[in-house]
Image: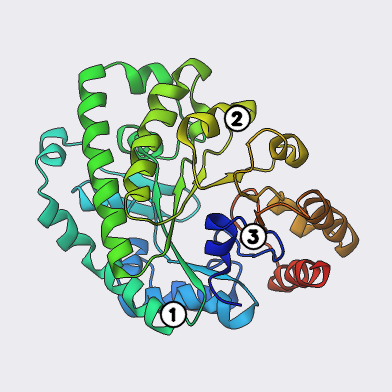
Amino acid sequence: MKDTLNNCIKNKISSYMPIWFMRQAGRYLPEFREIRKKNTDFIKLCLNPNLVNEITLQPLKRFDLDAAIIFSDILMIPYGLGQEVVFKKGIGPILGELNIEKIINTEPEDFIKKLLPVYQGIEKVKSELSGKNLIGFVGAPWTLLLYMINKESPKNNFDFNKINKDKILVNELLKKIEDMICLHIDKQIEAGADIIQIFDSWAGLLPVKELPIYCYIPILKIVEHIKSKKIPTICFPKGIGDNYVDFCNTVKPDCISIDYDIDPLWIKERVNGIPIQGGLDPKILLQEKDIIKKNSEKYLNIFKDYPYIFNLGHGVLPEIKPEMIEYVIRIVREKK
């Protein structure tokens, strides 16, 4: 079938359940690990259009999936703004010093020039992707702001007051980030992306009273920009719990992606028919097949007559076996 994600999101079709996986192109695939072994600089890898094309299509050559998501990273935006980004094995991303003047004064043309290989990679994928949807993506303003100021993953090192102490700097930086996110989205759409997903990976770290300021309103601006392009948006404000409902009421995304802490029945009854994506805990795919089947079928049954995209509540873990991805796809296909 063609254009299945768009049909689910735009037309709210529930007779066919599309399936794809966050991080479906990644370390759990031996063919990806082979490429990664020879390409140790992650940013350079994301800037190699031929390898981006190959990696993006790897899972679609293996599995019966409905969409490709471009192989890239949310931190390409800080990189495009001139902040150093290095990925260290076992640690994750490390960002360089924040030169606010340099970032604020980055011209759109210079940003596009630095990220041109990303868009060339999208064009290559699109030319080979017959009938399947191609998802482009960005990090949300809050998540990017956090990385840029914190200079590393906030997983083990986060202090909201430290991030928020210089309001003028934060506001200046947020405005620039929002502008560059919109530009990055425009270039991805021009290159062939037909759906955009916004990852607010660290939204769950925000104090509840700060969610409207740092999560809802900045994402709303970007969603409205994407809607003006007639392209559907999937939003993934990970970790915000019950506030998913407030998020949906404020932002009105075309589709909401839920994490594994969200009760699927609870959210289905509260988002006024907005298509839903995801939810299954990736760790379930490390269990025995009967547990995988039981948990997958829970989502299939709850969303049986609802516009729903089968996915996980976060990315595929490196230790998941490809056979288990294949097994989940089979469960979804047989159910429908």
Count the numbered circles shown.
3
Residue at disc 3, secondary structure:
loop
The image shows residue 221, relative to residue 32, as above or below, that is above
Q: Which numbered disc covers residue 245?
A: 2
Residue 274, percent from left and from top: 59, 44
Disc number lying in front (2 or 3): 3
Disc 3 packing (10 Å; few <14; some 14–19; many ≥20): some
Who is closer to the viewer here, 64 or 77? 64
The image shows residue 62, relative to residue 242, as above or below, that is below
Q: In the drawing, does residue 191 fall left or right of residue 328?
A: left
Q: Which numbered disc covers residue 24?
A: none
Residue at disc 1, secondary structure:
helix
Q: Which residue bears the numbered disc 1? A: 54
- Inspect the image, locate mark 3, and give the three-letter code of the amino acid beneath it: Ile
Who is closer to the viewer here, 282 or 330? 330
Give me the C-alpha separation between circle 2 and circle 3: 22 Å
Give me the C-alpha separation between circle 1 and circle 3: 31 Å
Q: In the drawing, does residue 209 fall left or right of residue 270?
A: left
Disc 2 packing (10 Å; few <14; some 14–19; many ≥20): some
To which quarter of the image does residue 71 belong? bottom left
- Inspect the image, locate mark 2, and give the three-letter code of the amino acid beneath it: Val
Q: Is residue 240 visible?
A: no
Which residue is farthest front? 11
| Residue at the image point whose x is 57% and y is 77% from the top | 60
Q: Which residue bears the numbered disc 3? A: 13
Residue 302, percent from left and from top: 80, 48
Its colouring scheme is rainbow
